[in-house]
Image: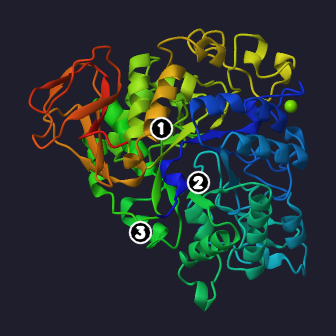
């Protein structure tokens, strides 16, 4: 029996900066986070993914790092980090850290050294003496970013940057750089991490602007190297990749089990929102039918929202327009011409039934669910914030000042707390929902609990069922002779459906409805608008 813990994990993602401030300086910190682990444990999550907390000039929310071996003093010390990991371990929570090694900050001592004439570190980054032809191509943030190469006066050369010009790309074909990246991983594994969310993987492994040596020509070879290092150092550690790829490229990233263990399913994510916009199951069914069979160790990371914009770049133009019209019609709600910078609850109009259905649906999809902090209580966004910041506001703990996030004067908070009439902290907060029957938080706890009791979804083979109702997504996940069946009505009108005749007796696991009438395959089944049901099929085995 091979123990792949991540196959049945529930991952909770947060930014230390906005979760809980313990010292009243207006900035979240590790001590604050350690005090709030009860909330994450009670939700039922089994793993935390922390956004970058390393020393950084913070021009890109910490994704611009100046020291890979430290904690930014704003968030505490390495000692606080170790205390936090111990507290998390006590609660059975594993920890995944953001590994951002496609680029550093321009302020990183490596870059400052590399730009000096004659520096032995020059080759750690990607340079061009001549003005590059692809100066304006391949920008990650079109409209905000001006180019992908910038002239450096000190170096007398252009440096390449897929992201902002303050984020020069590292040259991973340089063996010293690869060795340093392994040293960084080894350091944090030793301090209690169980793996890494690997930032910007397609850009990390590409060879733009460099000539790779013969043995590195295949860019995916580097994934094998990273994986080998991790597995020998710490057998249970994982790589969870940020790679917005098409289904046809999945094999290159997963390999036959020797490359990445997990990849965020961006393709499925975008089609879930298209399905929600249409009130039709077809877009999700389409992607699931296209999905290749993954190697045993391979797993998708499923999510609704994350810390970035809702990226719709893989939809057709007309499809993207549909999602924009439904969930982000105003220009201020959009970003980079491809995405929506909003949270789930406001996109779904604050309709608790619809939000609850969407969250249940995400947990029913094949893969490991990843929750963005605050989604479990239906937090809103702050569109007055620039770029991707509207969804990165402080966690709303209670109705006290600053939502209980900090005792600092409101003007000193790292970001303002959401305080509008519908989603403001006075109405939407953890304390108000903790013991309230019918709250979104209660619903999320039940969904997490049910999902953890259904290893069929994380481990098994998922099939789309035809139930004769186009608004209903019907999935059957089978593993080791047991099966879980989930039904989600994406439309606001009720739907009648028929289960396939070969469906066995059903035991209800989770439902939006109060009635307890038994379901059988030989009579039509009715779902209310945005209703959902989870069943275990056949005799009770678990
Ligand atoms: Mg603080």
Colour scheme in the image?
Answer: rainbow
Q: What is the secondary structure assignment of the residue under circle 1?
A: loop
Which residue is at the front of the view, 339 or 519? 519
Q: Residues within 10 Å of mark 3 (few under 14, many from 20)?
A: some
In the image, the residue with mark 3 has its CB under 8 Å from the nearest atom of ligand 1 = no
Q: Residues within 10 Å of mark 2 (few under 14, many from 20)?
A: some
* Distance in Å between CA atoms under marks 2 and 3: 24 Å
Relative horizontal placement of residue 386, taking residue 26 as reference (left or right): left
Residue 153 can be seen in this image? no
Point out residue 305 in the picture as x, y percentages from the top left corner: 52, 37
Relative horizontal placement of residue 532, taking residue 97 as reference (left or right): left
Q: Is residue 363 above or below residue 444?
A: below
Which badge, 2 or 3, is on the more N-terminal residue? 2
Which label number is shown at residue 304?
1
Which badge, 1 or 2, is on the more N-terminal residue? 2
**Front: mark 2 or 3:** 3
Quadrant occupied by the C terminus? top left
Relative horizontal placement of residue 487, taking residue 432 as reference (left or right): left
Q: Is residue 362 above or below residue 152?
A: above
Q: Which residue: 79% across, 54% down? A: 65
Point out residue 307 in the picture as x, y percentages from the top left corner: 61, 40
Q: Residues within 10 Å of mark 1 (few under 14, many from 20)?
A: many
Report which quarter residue 31 is drawn in. Answer: top right
* Residue indicated by mark 3: 251
Relative horizontal placement of residue 61, taking residue 481 as reference (left or right): right
Which label number is shown at residue 140?
2
* Distance in Å between CA atoms under marks 1 and 3: 23 Å
């Amino acid at each position: 029996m091979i123990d792949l813990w991540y196959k049945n994990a529930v991952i909770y993602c947060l930014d230390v900066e906005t979760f809980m401030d313990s010292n009243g300086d207006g900035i979240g910190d590790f001590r604050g986070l350690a005090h709030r682990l009860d909330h994450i444990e009670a939700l039922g999550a089994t793993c935390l993914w922390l956004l970058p907390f390393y020393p950084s000039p913070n021009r890109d929310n910490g994704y611009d790092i100046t020291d890979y071996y430290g904690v930014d003093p704003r968030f505490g010390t390495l000692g606080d980090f170790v205390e936090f990991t111990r507290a998390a371990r006590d609660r059975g929570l594993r920890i995944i850290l953001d590994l951002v090694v496609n680029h550093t900050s321009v302020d990183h001592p490596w870059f400052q050294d590399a730009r000096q004439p004659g520096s032995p570190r020059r080759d750690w980054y990607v340079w061009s003496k001549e003005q590059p032809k692809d100066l304006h191509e391949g920008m990650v943030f079109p409209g905000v970013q001006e180019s992908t190469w910038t002239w450096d006066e000190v170096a007398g050369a252009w440096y390449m940057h897929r992201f902002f010009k303050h984020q020069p790309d590292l040259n991973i074909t340089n063996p010293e750089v690869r060795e340093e990246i392994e040293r960084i991983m080894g350091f944090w594994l030793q301090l209690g991490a169980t793996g890494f969310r690997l930032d910007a993987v397609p850009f990390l492994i590409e060879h733009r602007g460099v000539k790779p040596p013969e043995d590195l020509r295949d860019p995916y070879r580097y994934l094998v190297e990273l994986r080998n290092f991790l597995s020998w150092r710490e057998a249970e550690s994982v790589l969870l990749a940020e790679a917005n790829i098409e289904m046809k490229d999945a094999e290159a990233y997963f390999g036959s089990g020797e490359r990445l263990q997990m990849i965020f399913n961006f393709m499925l994510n975008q089609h879930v929102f298209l399905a929600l916009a249409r009130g039709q199951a077809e877009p999700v069914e389409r992607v699931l039918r296209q999905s290749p069979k993954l190697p045993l160790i391979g797993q998708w990371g499923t999510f609704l929202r994350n810390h970035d914009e809702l990226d719709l770049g893989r939809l057709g133009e007309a499809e993207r327009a549909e999602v924009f019209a439904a969930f982000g019609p105003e220009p201020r709600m959009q970003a980079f011409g491809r995405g929506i910078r909003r949270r789930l609850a406001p996109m779904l109009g604050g309709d608790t039934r619809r939000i609850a259905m969407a969250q249940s649906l995400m947990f029913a999809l094949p893969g490991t669910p990843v929750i963005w902090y605050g989604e479990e209580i239906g937090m809103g966004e702050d569109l007055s914030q620039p770029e991707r910041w509207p969804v990165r506001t402080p966690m709303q703990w209670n109705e006290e000042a600053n939502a209980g996030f900090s005792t600092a004067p409101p003007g000193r908070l790292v970001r303002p707390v959401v305080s509008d009439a519908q989603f403001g902290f006075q109405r939407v907060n953890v304390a108000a929902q903790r013991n309230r029957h019918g709250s979104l938080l209660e619903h999320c706890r039940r969904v997490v609990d049910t999902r953890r009791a259904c290893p069929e979804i994380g481990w098994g083979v998922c099939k789309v069922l035809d139930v004769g109702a186009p608004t209903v997504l019907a999935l059957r996940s089978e593993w080791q002779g047991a099966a879980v069946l989930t039904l989600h009505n994406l439309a606001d009108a009720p739907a009648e459906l028929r289960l396939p005749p070969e469906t066995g007796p059903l035991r209800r696991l989770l439902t939006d409805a109060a009635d307890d009438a038994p379901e059988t395959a030989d009579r039509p089944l009715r779902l209310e608008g945005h209703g959902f049901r989870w069943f275990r099929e056949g005799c009770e085995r678990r």
